[in-house]
Amino acid sequence: MTTIVIIGCILLVGLVIFQIAKINEMIKKIKGEEEAVQQSNDSTAVAVLVFGILFLFLSIYTSYHFKDMMFGYGPNLAVTKHGALIDNSMHIMLVITGIVFVLTHILLFYFTWRYRYSKKRLGWYYPHNNKLEAVWTITPFIVLAYLAINGLVVWNQMMEDVKPNDKHIEIEVTGMQFAWLIRYPGPDGKLGTKNYKLISGTNDLGQDWNDSKNWDDFKPDELVVPKGRKIRIRINSRDVLHSFFLPQFRVKMDAVPGMPTYFVFTPTMTTDEFKNNLKKYPEWNVPADPSDPESKMKWETFTFELACAELCGDSHFAMRRAVRVVTQDQYDAWVKEQQSYYLANVRGKDGDPNKGKTITVNGVANTGIAAEKPAEGDASAKTDSTKAE
Amino acid sequence: MSTQSIEVRDHIDDLIDKNGFDDHFHDHHESDKYKSSFIGKYIFSLDHKMISRQFLITGVIWAIIGALFSVIFRLQLGFPEADMAWLKPLLGKWIVLNDAGFGTISQEFYYALVTMHGTILVFFVLTAGLSGTFSNFLIPLQVGARDMASPLLNMLSYWFFFLAGIVMLCSLFLNTGPFAGGWTAYPPLSALPQASSGSKGGMNLWIISMTLFIISQLLGGINYVTTVLNLRTKGMSMWKMPLTIWSFLVTAILGILTFPVLFAGVLLLLFDRSMGTSFYLSEIFIQGAALENVGGSPILYQHLFWFLGHPEVYIVILPAMGIVSEVMSVNSRKPIFGYRAMVYSLMAIAFLSLLVWAHHMFTSGMNPFITNFFVLFTLIIAMPSSIKTFNWITTLFRGNLRLNSSMLYSIGFVSLFISGGLTGIWVASSTLDIALHDTYFVVAHFHLVMGVAAFFGMFAGLSYWYPKMFGRYMNETILKVHFWITLIGAYCIFWPQHYLGLAGVPRRYYRFDSFSSFSGWEGVNEFITISAIIVFFTQLLWVFNFFYSMWKGKKVTERNPWHSNSIEWTTPIIPPHGNWPGKLPQVERWPYDYGKDGKDFITQITPYEEGEEVVN
């Protein structure tokens, strides 16, 4: 029913506009074409001017209004070293393009109004002026050269890969339809080899269990990184293209099947520090659940998030993982709590090529029986393997 | 000797009779023969004016379909919690009902809509609809040719386009749905039927449709280039051509150079899909199975695609620039400022557009060192673009502006081009692109600069040349209402999307509530959707005006209603087959002598007076 009413209303509005249009044409005939054209020309010129003023006013006003939601403003400071550089470049860009935007629009709308048609005038015969054109070729050149140099210096800085003696942490993130799989190297600091043909229900990355580097790798549900350490994310995909996107970190890089990519960044702010920043803004001091005034404040529930930024299929919009930035101490404690995926889930089972053999994981002998009888043996196996760090 | 209505002879006829060039066209009776049958005249027409109208009307139909799709997916984005069961009768299984009878748009369908909206608008409307219409209509009329160099290829060009459209239309009705992996069709998503239901039959039809479309573009493009280079009338040197013709020429050359690369890209994709090759596939585990393909690279497809894909956006915008330059100069009663600079900047933009494709791929995993070059070349494009913008603004300076609808659309075009162009500098910077790539900022940028702006160029051209096409005027009041609502509405839709993008909200998301980082924009999204609905219905008003005016519009009584200089206005009000009933006009001067020596306008066929300064 409402559909019919809405359609009816729309048709009615259309009909009204059409009738007005017809009447307008009739008025034109009565008044005399020239008179009517002149009048509508004048009113249109005023309309253009009014539009121009409102447009410029609203564009500036709304940007100010939404300021605190945008990158680089309010609480949304980048939480990485290179992110701050990006935000800085963005500020410079905003100022320069903003000035050009306002000036050109003022000229465009002012000229339209100022030089509206008059019977008494002719257009000025002014086909070209080489000097003027040289000015607006060279000026943009200088401005663009500045922007290009500024941008590329930052670009080459932030795209630099880790150096051999960097004490970085390498973490692997693999995209699949529709989740992110996260793998940490474990105490040995090395990610084990993998082969996509080995992927199975218990081995979603295709890790090669013959490779001892895999034995201590762990696969948490969230991405945890320490503040102040260089992090190198090794980005992979199992099936189609995905894109590893950490909005607050200003990190984005595609995950390409068959071609690992990477992104190196250094977090500069922990989640808690970021939250404390949010606390200062009234829009974050509201209950997270609007229907429950007793619930936690919005800033308290804040988490960094990992998203997918490259269309990868039906559930592309739901590839979320929580991300936490912690202090180095908290990070070390967290790592200690993590269990090796191999030892916890594969060791001693049918899929384990080392079944029955005794292997040494980070200096600790493992017979493979502990995994089956976790009651007594597990505590020692776990703490021993992580102590090695 | 000809059959159209007899008009009062005026000095234009005298001039053509006196100076014109007699090519004996009408001595050959067979040149008019095709007109005898209905099919020959209206369907398989060889006449460039009819083919242009075919392109136009087909483009209008596709535009309505494409816009309707955007309204449906905007409903999902603006009102994700609303009951969509009322769409069930129309969309069938794409609306999923729960037990309570509450309907939601399915995710598959949402992505199919987004993909088809992009494909249809970019290729069928803004490439075929815009270039096809105006290049066909204006090239022979403005260079003084009887028709296209090859009317047959021209006809084929339309019918290949038509077929491409039919194939794409069929894909909408497949059980598995049309392709749903974005208009760029990146593999492996597009290469693997297992990856998405749209990548099954829908993708095959997409590839076939694109192939037919590429053929259409090449046939058309070769024809445009040949006609401009070879069939100019006597006296029409290259530097005397209107800027519209320059833009069509450059566009056509660009299309010929780049469309075959897209063909290569989709052909390899077809091989990967159906013949087990591995051009784009490597180490994939999907749907519980590891594929045999190794060694391919999805990045290769991106290179091939964007080698067309980037020039494609210039193929869309350059004709609009040409149209706006012409319309703006005529309605300012003032020569276009810096004619040669305008031509050189067209060429520069076209040339540079071939060197910047990888700026779509800054985050693709491509070697970051190569990015440096693409950033530099991309930023250089801002120079010819700013030359054009300043020249348009200077054209208005001290003009005598007739603010009719075509002029308003042109001014709107410049505003949109500035707004969308400046954000182009943002995303051209690889540094900022890390934050902005695949967010709504990009959506806002390209919709303003090549979507809405190109539409405004098209609207400007259609208001302006409608009298030449159909012998009647469109209703001016409706056009002005349409202009204002569309301009304001377009800014209401796309301006706020900059803010979303700057907050990191990614594009191509079905809903945003899975992430707290992207929430908080519900009100803005509602606002955008409502604006989009209003703008959509306003476009229907334009469509109504377009068809209504064909039969009921005010008749054109003057041969040169806009007092223009260019020679399409020296033809009879409705140009006959062969365009000029007698001799071809001889061109004496450039087309922009407005306001010279105290005269409001001096047509291109008027010889120079003694002592008159020769400009250009």
Image (cartoon, coloured by chain):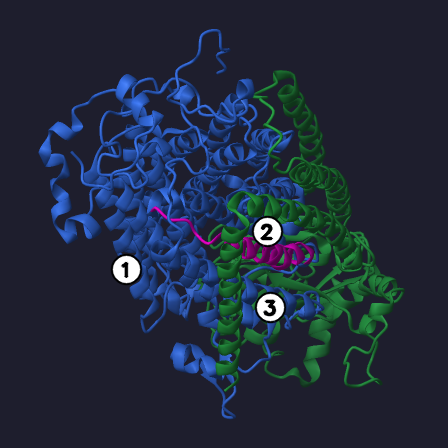
Chain colours: A green, B blue
Q: Residue type at mark 1: give it.
A: Ile
Cα separation, mark 1 vs mark 3, equals 31 Å
Q: Do the residues labelled 3 and 2 touch (CB within 8 Å)?
A: no
Mark 3 packing: few (<14 Cα in 10 Å), some, or many (20+)? many
Q: Which of the two residues, A162 or B143, is positioned nearer the viewer here? A: B143
Pair 1/2: label in front = 1
**Stretch in magenta:** B471-499
In the structure shown, which secondary structural element does the residue marked by tag 2 occupy?
A: helix
Residue bearing mark 1: B166
Q: Residue type at mark 3: give it.
A: Ile
Residue bearing mark 3: B530
Where does residue B173 sit, x and y in percent of width and height?
Answer: 32, 70
Tell me which numbered mark, 3 or 2, is placed earlier along the sequence.
2
Left or right: residue B91 versus residue B358 is left
Relative to residue A143, is residue B73 depicted above or below? Answer: below
Relative to residue A276, is residue B561 depicted above or below? Answer: above
Left or right: residue B382 versus residue B138 is right
Where does residue B247 sit, x and y in percent of width and height?
Answer: 43, 33
Please identify the residue farthest to the bottom as the structure is shown.
Answer: B100
Mark 1 packing: few (<14 Cα in 10 Å), some, or many (20+)? few
Residue bearing mark 2: B442
Pair 1/3: label in front = 3
